[in-house]
Image (cartoon, rainbow, N blue to C red):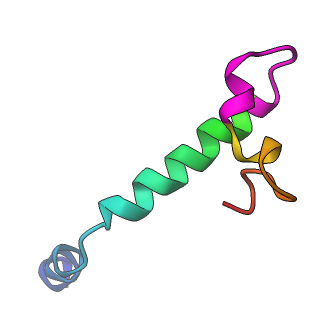
Amino acid sequence: MAKSKASLSEAFERDLRLDFFRGLGLWMIFLDHIPDDVVSWLTMRNYGFSDAAEF
């Protein structure tokens, strides 16, 4: 049974694009919570009606 479970997990590979954008969104959320941070002006919360959680 372990052999079929291992082959099933090998059939589904992770989509690196999804991981990249999820990580980018998490970094934006992190930067938005730092007070008086210059880098937070580059996040999405300053350029629309949403923040990185909707990203």
Q: How many labels does the image show?
A: 0
Say above or below: 36 vs 3: above
For the C terminus, the quadrant is bottom right
- Residue 36 in the image: above or below residue 45: above
- Position of residue 46 relative to residue 33, above or below, is below
Q: In which quarter of the image is residue 30?
A: top right
| Range shown magenta | 32-42
Outermost residue, front side: 47
Q: Between residues 11 and 23, which one lies in front from this camera angle?
A: 23
Work out whether residue 51 or residue 5 is closer to the camera in this orientation and state it. 51
Q: Which residue is drawn at 77% across and 48% down?
A: 47
State the residue at coordinates (87%, 17%): 35
Q: Is residue 55 magenta?
A: no
- Picture coordinates of residue 9 (x, y %)? 24, 75
For this view, does 32 lie left or right of residue 39? right
Residue at horizontal 77 percent and vertical 16 percent from the top: 37
Q: Is residue 38 magenta?
A: yes
Quadrant, the N terminus: bottom left
| Front position in the image: 3 or 18 | 18
Question: Residue 19: x and y, percent?
Answer: 42, 56
In the displayed structure, does residue 44 sit left or right of residue 48? Answer: left
Residue 52 position, x and y percent, is 72, 51
